[in-house]
Amino acid sequence: MEMLRLKSEHPISPYAPVWNTPIGFAQWEETNKVDIIREFLLDKEKKIINDLPYRNDGRTGLDASNVTTRHGRFNTFEFKDECPEIGDLLKWIKFQYINYIMQDGTRPYDLRIGSWFNVIRKGDCITKHRHSAMFSAYLSGNMHLDDYETCTYYEHMEQGQEVKNFKGGLTLFPSYVEHAVPEYKGTVPRVSIAFDLYLDMPPYYSVGKNIISEEFFNIENDLQSNESG
């Protein structure tokens, strides 16, 4: 995993903000599986929109006709029984999570994952938003399922980084980082997977009851399997 940092300058005032925000990048090379997942999710799109009630736009600016507005009503990774390639992707993301925290020098946690997918079409954009800035905020991610002539712009404290969207490209970042996608001008649907990692640490269990999630990382089991593998 490649890492970059949005980093503040050395403060000369006691009230100047200080930050050092890690953003990680990796690419899943199994492009045939990426293609299968993309087509599977496109086939699911209408059913999710029709069957699940609108939740909110997550400050993305997308309207009720967009599958993004059902975030929290379903979990992308719950479809792994129907599409085994989604299960393979989940395992790969877990490995990248370990790489991320090792490079950043932070400890692992027991975690749950909540995920949704985004489909935007010509003329759509995703306005600047963040996933969480609460006391229990942890990590979020975006993954793109094809090569798109678009970029996602990540920003913290008015310092930003533009990241090109390419097939199998994963970005991991603290959940407080704002991000946006400019108007999409492509002719094929732009499909991406988004997710949040939540602390599974009672009493600070940070997933709301109305958010569909599943176990993502268990320290006792996953660290041992990673070391043995």
Image (cartoon, rainbow, N blue to C red):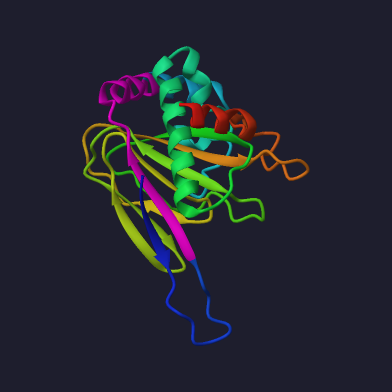
On the image, the x and y values in percent for residue 57 come to 51, 43
Question: In the image, what residue occupies the spot 30% across and 56% down?
Answer: 162
Question: In the image, what residue occupies the spot 34% across and 59% down?
Answer: 161
Question: In the image, what residue occupies the spot 47% across and 36% down?
Answer: 68
**Range of magenta residues:** 20-42
15 with respect to 228 (left or right): right
Name, please, the residue furthest toward the bottom.
Answer: 12
Q: In this view, does 132 lie above or below 97?
A: below
Q: How many labels does the image show?
A: 0
Is residue 21 shown in magenta? yes
Question: In the image, what residue occupies the spot 23% across and 44% down?
Answer: 185
Q: In this view, does 162 lie above or below 123?
A: below
Is residue 198 visible to us here?
A: yes
Give the position of the C terminus as an image quadrant: top left
Q: Which of 81 and 92 is in front in this view?
A: 92
On the image, the x and y values in percent for residue 219 come to 62, 35
100 with respect to 121 (left or right): right
Q: Nearer the viewer, residue 34 or 100?
A: 100
Is residue 205 shown in magenta? no
On the image, the x and y values in percent for residue 20 come to 47, 65
Is residue 65 visible to us here?
A: no
Name, please, the residue furthest toward the top.
Answer: 82
Name, please, the residue furthest toward the front.
Answer: 228
155 with respect to 111 (left or right): left
On the image, the x and y values in percent for residue 213 come to 60, 30
Q: Nearer the viewer, residue 59 or 17?
A: 17
